[in-house]
Image: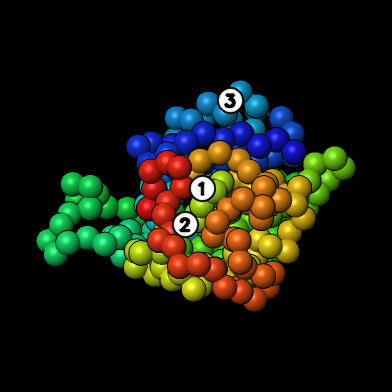
Amino acid sequence: MLVAGFPAGSFAANCYIVAPAAGEECVIIDPGQEAEAGIDEILREHRLKPVAVLLTHGHLDHVWSVAPVCGAKDVPAYIHPDDRDLLTDPAKGLSLQPGQELFGGLTLSEPDDVKELADGAALELAGLEFTVDHAPGHTKGSVTFRTPPAGEVPDVMFTGDLLFAGSIGRTDLPGGSYEEILASLSRVCLGMPDETAVLPGHGPQTTIGRERATNPFLADLTEGTGGSSPRKTARPGPDKGF
């Protein structure tokens, strides 16, 4: 499997392009701010043809470029229905002051073709299989995408802003919940094998095993139940983000 990525724009939200191999079809995950040029460079370099855009959640730093990317490539966007309204009203996901404009009056629009994601759905795209896990807590409609192991390649999980290297997504914005994100981490992440590669929405790649052993937010969680965890202020990952 070919995975190429880069941190997009001033928020450094990771945008990923995933394909079976060079010269094949691909999917784009989370095209954030100013992502179009980086996407086009990777598509040219690896001779890839996009067939879909997958969105881990609806925050602006992850969906900023979704409409122009989908329009230029004539491909659908996939998002959980609980976050779909953020595609046209991203301010709903932020804590703006009364009268405060969003980035100088920025407006967004939905792509022409939007498909809604369901928990447990299996997406067959670009010759790959992605399993969708609804993982609320950072936003109501946060999801992860995971691919099964293939040969020597372990499971790969695109976690969005659910799980980072050493941290978890913030829960202090509208739609966030500390209790829900702990339950999502327990249900979605802790049951995965230690060697599972975690490609997060911000910051460096990690593994489930590394986070299980070192991430303070996972320390007292038990698989599948949410368990308990010391009350900490959940913060964004190592880079800027929502």
What residue is at 34 percent from the left and 64 percent from the top? 173
Using the image as rendered, state which of residue 133 and residue 77 is in the foreground.
133
Place of residue 101 in the rendered image (x, y in percent of width and height, measured from the top left): 17, 54
Q: Residue furthest right?
A: 151
What residue is at 57 percent from the left and 73 percent from the top? 228
The three-letter amino acid code for the residue at tag 1 is: Gly
Label located before the other in sequence (3 or 1): 3
The three-letter amino acid code for the residue at tag 3 is: Arg
Q: Which residue is mark 1?
A: 201
The numbered dot on residue 44 is 3
Label located before the other in sequence (1 or 2): 2
**Distance of mark 2 from mark 3, alpha carbons?**
32 Å
The three-letter amino acid code for the residue at tag 2 is: Gly
**Distance of mark 3 from mark 1, alpha carbons?**
23 Å
The numbered dot on residue 169 is 2
Are the residues at dot 1 and dot 2 in contact (C-beta closer than 8 Å)? yes
Place of residue 76 in the rendered image (x, y in percent of width and height, measured from the top left): 54, 53
> Within 10 Å of the Cα at label 2, are there few (<14), some (14-19), or many (20+) other Cα atoms?
many
Q: Disc 1 or disc 2, which is closer to the eye?
A: 2
Place of residue 59 in the rendered image (x, y in percent of width and height, measured from the top left): 40, 56
Place of residue 231 in the rendered image (x, y in percent of width and height, measured from the top left): 45, 67
* Label 3 residue SS: helix
What residue is at 51 percent from the left and 72 percent from the top? 180
Can residue 219 be seen at all in this image of the molecule? yes
Residue 11 found in image quarter: top left
Q: Disc 3 or disc 1, which is closer to the eye?
A: 1
Are the residues at dot 2 and dot 3 in contact (C-beta closer than 8 Å)? no
* Label 1 residue SS: loop
When the figure is inspected, residue 204 is found, relative to residue 122, above or below; the finding is above
